[in-house]
Amino acid sequence: MNKLNVIGVDLAKNVIQVSMLSHTNRELANRSLTRRKFAEFLGKQKLNLVAFEACAMAHHWARTAQRHGHEVDADAGHGIPSLPGSGLSISRPINTSSARSHDQIEAIRIGEACSALRPDRPSTQRGPGARIY
């Protein structure tokens, strides 16, 4: 699992923001996709760890990702550093210039928070894994 890339996903009503992080935590891509394009995207990717912020739609998309053979991790919002009240800080600064949207930044942070690639953040306590139905 350590060599898997991580796909951080920020779900919204009409557009899904996707951030791909390498196994070394380097950002490979960050783009928005429609629902249909996101389903096609999951089918075309090699096996990855797909990370969602736990919510109602995450269960649907997690099942879709699992059907394509991806590993899935869903994390509650308290584990994502950029969300209010999380109390966590990210060790790697993210370019938050006006060229990046809030959704782009969230997708990166979701990927980082759900990834098992962050031994430098031992203070992050992950609760029991989210159940995907």
Image (cartoon, grey):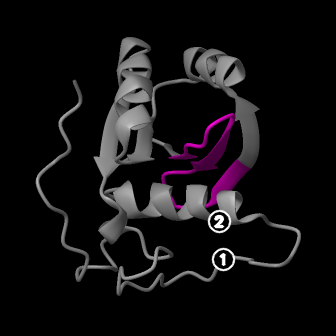
Residue name at image x 69 percent, y 34 percent: 14
Looking at the image, can residue 1 be seen? no
30 is higher (above) or lower (below) than 40: below
Which amino acid lies under the numbered mark 1 shown in the image of this protein?
Ile
Q: Nearer the viewer, residue 124 or 61?
A: 61
Q: Quadrant of residue 96?
A: bottom right
Question: Nearest the camera: 114 or 48?
Answer: 114
Q: Judge from the rendering whether residue 42 lies leftward or rightward of residue 65; answer left or right.
A: right
Res 105 label:
2
In the figure, residue 49 lies in which quadrant? top left
Which secondary structure, mark 1? loop
Q: Badge 2: how crowded within 10 Å, few (<14), some, or many (20+)?
A: some
Q: Which residues are magenta?
A: 9-29
Q: Which mark is residue 94?
A: 1
Residue lying furthest left in this view?
A: 128
Q: Amino acid at mark 2?
A: Ile
